[in-house]
Image (spheres, rainbow, N blue to C red):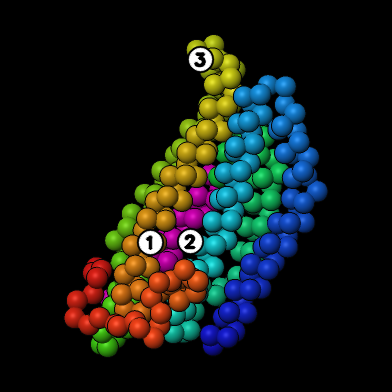
Amino acid sequence: MDQTLMEKDLFAFWGIAVAVFSFLLGTNVRQAVEQDLKNPNRIEGVSDLALLVALFAWFLLYLYSTYFEAKGMGLVFPPEVLDKLGTNVSFLVMALALAVFFALILAYHEKIIVVCIMAILLGVVDTFGNQTLMSGMLALSANSNSTEFVQKCSETIWYAYYINNPQLQRIFLYIAIAITALVLAIYREQLSNRVPPNLARNISKYLIIIAIIFNEATMLNWRTERENALEEVGRSYYFQWSPYNPISSSSKTVKTGNCPITL
């Protein structure tokens, strides 16, 4: 698979995701927002709206990061390596599944038990996906034949991103938060006897929002470290794409010697 075909796959992947997502969500997003704003219980309405915004941001960040992950890998690894990692496998199926998942979780955001269950399921899928990538990166790092500095360093930075960072622990933590939120949602009536009723009804929503913020902030920190390191050797797709890149390609001096990140 050449680079051009890979790019077409990426556009097809997210084109279907956005199309299905828009179709499923479009008919009830306005109704959902109006329902939240008109909720006679102001605290509950604001909490539902805050959860809706957080879930929508989660979708956009998932879309954004997945696109740049694949494009960034394509800048460093040859197509045959990407095939081994599985980045081009079942893209259309993944797009459909993610589109349906996010459309449902947003359309039924006021049903916190549904949100918690869907978040847990996404965590399970995320675990298998990251485990596959981690195993693939570990195998590639052990069998790498690259000797040229920029290529070797670029590969090492990607290996380190998956191998050095506690990817699975990150996922397990947000799954644990979602499970806690689910338990509190199921037993909210009993909980209301111990804490203020508004807190009992809405605490699960707050926990899901916290889980999303924690997960995305952690990923942003790791990705920023990775992209800054890749930029030092001129292999950051983000910095090549970004209109805010302060370093022009013509003035970029590729460093040699020590790689900024090691395994």
Circle on res. 203: none
Residue found farthest to the left: 257
Location of residue 261 by image quarter = bottom left
Residue found farthest to the top: 193
Q: Residue at 64% across / 33% down in the picture?
A: 48
Asked if 198 appears above or below 209 in the picture, the reply is above
Quick one: SS at disc 3? loop
Tag 2: amino acid: Gly
In the rendered structure, does residue 117 fall within the stretch colored magenta? no
Q: Quadrant of the C terminus?
A: bottom left
Circle on res. 129: 2
Badge 3 local density, few (<14 within 10 Å), some, or many (20+)?
few
Q: Nearer the viewer, mark 3 or mark 1?
A: 1
Quick one: SS at disc 1? helix
Q: Nearer the viewer, mark 2 or mark 1?
A: 1
Q: Residue at 62% across / 57% down in the picture?
A: 98
Relative to the observer, which residue lies in front, 81 or 220?
220
Badge 1 local density, few (<14 within 10 Å), some, or many (20+)?
few
